[in-house]
Image (spheres, rainbow, N blue to C red):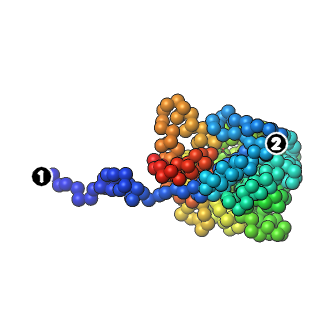
Amino acid sequence: MTAFPTRRLRRLRGTPALRRLAAEHHLVPSQLVLPVFVKEGITEAQPIASMPGVSQHPLDALPDVVDAAASAGLGGIMLFGVPLTRDATGTGATSPDGILNRAIAVAARAAAGRLTVQADLCLDEFTDHGHCGVLAADGSVDNDATLEIYAEMGVAQARAGADVLGLSGMMDGQVGAVRAALDAAGFANVAILAYSAKYASAFYGPFRDAVESTLQGDRRTYQMDPANGREGVEEALFDIAEGADVVMVKPAMPYLDVLARVADASSVPVWAYQVSGEYAMIEHAASAGLIDRERAIGESLLGIRRAGADVILTYWAIEVAGWLRAGKELA
Ligand code: PBG
């Protein structure tokens, strides 16, 4: 006679109620952060062709976006500025009149404590060459000269009212430099989100459209090599030692192994950024009728949670928060 299995793992999969009871991972709206693009000089929202459903917003419309994000119960918004003019050193990033600093001020006022206002701290949207830092005479990205500008940019963002600064430029020492500048300027309570393991990724393609990037070439001399996992953990540990309050892995889906390793090693919260290319792939595959859109979105987010993300930055944040409030299963 055949020996029947005594352990039957299917038992807990038999009904929706059992599956809900047995689910190891969940998502709530406060674990989602919405990236928001604010463009200088426009009066109407401008759809981003490469990211169906995502727009650049005029400054005047930002309070409505903040209201929508707050009513959805999101944990925050991450602001990106798209300026009208750019220069070699990215002066629009440090000026209080720069579009990002103005957007922070408008968002902070509209948020009134209902959600966190976070800002991208990087020069790429403000430099005419599109790199994340200033260039040395030989054309390379000058790490230490860039740190001085990041420090100034961090203080400008804090002064405008940001709660969390997202350091995404991948310069060595950026967390320590910005932390010291914030503390010296009286902003000891402004938090630093370090994009610690940020890879030189093709999946940022649609974002470069969203911010009208002028970059020629690539960012391989400062963003991480996709071949390296251990180094991602090292980056996170360095950032924690320099004072990061949160560390992040980005992109998410192609780097879930790195996310899991960083989550194991980190003493601070670990977030993940589901980037523009991840968004666009699912949207396009769904429009082509190849996958079930909502299930694919839900599964992608659960996978990122399961790998170890405490919070996820995603362009679907508002929509998914709506599903969660309605009690919909994610996958
Ligand atoms: C840098 C920055 C980038 C993204 C977020 N911050 C672009 C880059 O590093 O080239 C990408 C986000 C996305 O693709 O959704 N300011």
Does the beta carbon at disc 1 come under 8 Å from ligand 1? no
Does the beta carbon at disc 2 come under 8 Å from ligand 1? no
Nearer the observer, 68 or 103: 68
Q: Secondary structure at mark 1?
A: loop
Query: Which quadrant of the view contains residue 17?
Result: bottom left
Measured Cα–Cα span from mark 2 to mark 1: 76 Å
Residue at (86, 41) in percent of width and height: 85
Q: Position of residue 212 (x, y in %)?
A: 76, 38
Q: Position of residue 262 (x, y in %)?
A: 57, 60
**Relative to 274, is 184 above or below?**
below
**Relative to 117, is 62 above or below?**
above
Residue at (60, 49) in percent of width and height: 317
Q: Residues within 10 Å of mark 1 (few under 14, many from 20)?
A: few
| Residue receiving disc 2 | 40
Outermost residue toward the left in this view:
1
**Relative to 195, is 187 above or below?**
below
Q: Secondary structure at mark 2?
A: loop
Nearer the observer, 269 or 63: 63
Image-based side of 165 in relation to 87, left or right: left
Q: Position of residue 39 (x, y in %)?
A: 78, 42
Image-based side of 185 in relation to 225, left or right: right
Q: Earlier in the sequence, mark 2 or mark 1?
A: 1
Q: Residues within 10 Å of mark 2 (few under 14, many from 20)?
A: many
Q: Position of residue 256 (x, y in %)?
A: 54, 52
Nearer the observer, 229 or 154: 154
Image-based side of 104 in relation to 245, left or right: right
**Residue 1, disc:** 1
Closest to the camera, between mark 2 and mark 1, is: 2
> What's the amino acid at mark 2?
Glu
Outermost residue toward the top in this view:
288
**Relative to 3, is 126 above or below?**
above
Residue 182 seen by the camera: yes
